[in-house]
Image (cartoon, rainbow, N blue to C red):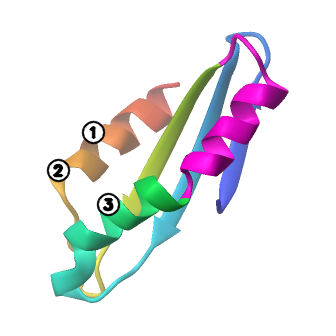
Amino acid sequence: MDARFIDHEKKKVLAVQMSCPWMENREKKQEQKAIKYSPFRWEIKQQFPGYDIRQYNIIIDVLGEWATEVDEDMRELFRA
């Protein structure tokens, strides 16, 4: 993970992973990150029982394009 934000008042943990793959690999990278960091999410759940754990994969390809999921994640992150 590139960053982990813990909000004790709202009982939330935001785990942020960022990467910059080649254009064809953007969707594949999203799947890889979800699988790769599932043990990390489990570990955080053990450390912070009762907290809402969210993983955000911010994947922007080398030409600066991203999926609509990134837009949604960014809105949710910065609204939090």
Q: State the residue in front, 55 or 80.
A: 55
The correct choice, above or below, for 50 with respect to 2 in the image is above
In the image, 41 versus 64, the foreground residue is 41
> Where does residue 29 sit, x and y in percent of width and height?
33, 71
**Residue span colored magenta:** 37-51
Q: Is residue 13 above or below residue 25?
A: above
Which residue is identified by label 2?
68
- In three-dimensional space, the C-alpha distance between marks 1 and 3, rounded to whole angstroms, equals 17 Å
Residue located beneath label 1 in the image: 72
Nearer-N-terminus badge (3/2) = 3
> Secondary structure under badge 3?
helix
Instruction: Judge whether residue 39 can be spotted in this image.
Output: yes
Q: Residues within 10 Å of mark 2 (few under 14, many from 20)?
A: few
Q: Looking at numbered disc 1 in the image, what kind of residue is underneath it? A: Glu
Closer mark to the observer between disc 3 and disc 2: 3
Identify the residue shown where x is 64% and y is 59%: 1
Q: Is residue 36 or residue 2 the one in the foreground?
A: 36
The image position of residue 79, as x and y in percent, is 46, 27
User: In the rendering, which numbered label is found on residue 46?
Assistant: none
Image coordinates of residue 30 in percent, x first then y, are: 32, 62
Say the numbered circle drawn on residue 31: 3
Task: Evaluate if marks 1 and 2 touch, with contact meaning CB atoms under 8 Å apart.
Answer: yes
Q: Is residue 53 magenta?
A: no
In this orientation, does residue 64 appear? no
Q: Amino acid at mark 3?
A: Glu
